[in-house]
Amino acid sequence: MSELSHVNRAGEASMVDVSAKPATARMARAEGRIRMSADALRAIRDNTLAKGDVLAVARVAGIQAAKRTADLIPLCHPLALTDVQVRFTLDEALPGVRCEADARTVAGTGVEMEAVTAVSVALLTVYDMAKSVDKAMQIDGVRLLEKSGGKSGLWRVAGDAREP
């Protein structure tokens, strides 16, 4: 069995020392979705919710969350992000909203947690802003799609044919 990276020799939770790792360009992409009623999706699409433009606010929330990931996840390294992009697709077939986020940096550790956090908080923001129409919305499918950079190079979720 491989050794856990965030546990020291005494078995205590510990931050990984990345000071000897070279800084490389790193990217991570994550996705998730929120399922909702057709009425809630229509209200988001038509921008008729009292709280305002749901997707604009959720995009900013996702970017802000990526920048604050180390404040939320105890053993994450604080990173100087060079780019965060949050995109939404309205999906009538769900019905709901799909979210995808990319995070980039040049550092000695990756940005996977930042991308996943961006998606998670963006979707939570959609929920918060649309809950007056549908309290039964369901967030799911939040996952890392791909990462690049560092010693391990490119990784993609199996079966994902997207180009980086």
Image: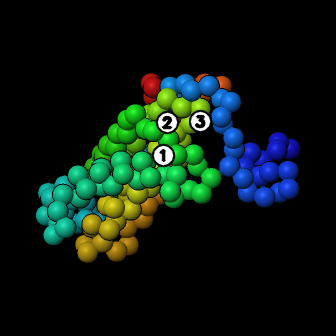
- Asked if the residue under mark 2 is in contact with the one under mark 1, i.e. CB atoms within 8 Å, the reply is yes
Find residue 36 and report its horizontal and vertical position in percent. 33, 64
Q: Residues within 10 Å of mark 3 (few under 14, many from 20)?
A: many
Q: Residues within 10 Å of mark 1 (few under 14, many from 20)?
A: many
The nearer-to-camera label among 1 and 2 is 1
Q: Earlier in the sequence, mark 1 or mark 2?
A: 2
Instruction: Identify the secondary structure beneath mark 2.
Output: strand
Q: Vertical placement of 90 versus 158: above or below? A: below
- How far apart marks 1 and 3 lie (CA) works out to 11 Å
- Asked if the residue under mark 2 is in contact with the one under mark 3, i.e. CB atoms within 8 Å, the reply is no
Residue at image location 17% in from the left, 62% down from the top: 52
Question: Which numbered disc covers residue 28?
Answer: 2
Find residue 142 and report its horizontal and vertical position in percent. 49, 51
Find residue 5 and report its horizontal and vertical position in percent. 74, 45
Find residue 46 and report its horizontal and vertical position in percent. 14, 57
Q: Earlier in the sequence, mark 3 or mark 2?
A: 2
Is residue 156 visible in the rendered image? The answer is: no
82 horizontally vs 112: left or right: left
Question: Which numbered disc covers residue 146?
Answer: none
**Residue type marked 3:** Thr
Residue at image location 34% in from the left, 43% down from the top: 86
Residue at image location 37% in from the left, 67% down from the top: 137
**Residue type marked 2:** Ala
- Is 101 or 91 nearer to us in this picture? 101
- Is 121 or 95 nearer to us in this picture? 121
Question: Which numbered disc covers residue 114?
Answer: 1
Name the quadrant of the N terminus: top right
Name the quadrant of the C terminus: top left
Read off the residue under disc 3.
109
**Residue type marked 1:** Glu
Q: Which quarter of the figure has residue 110?
A: top right
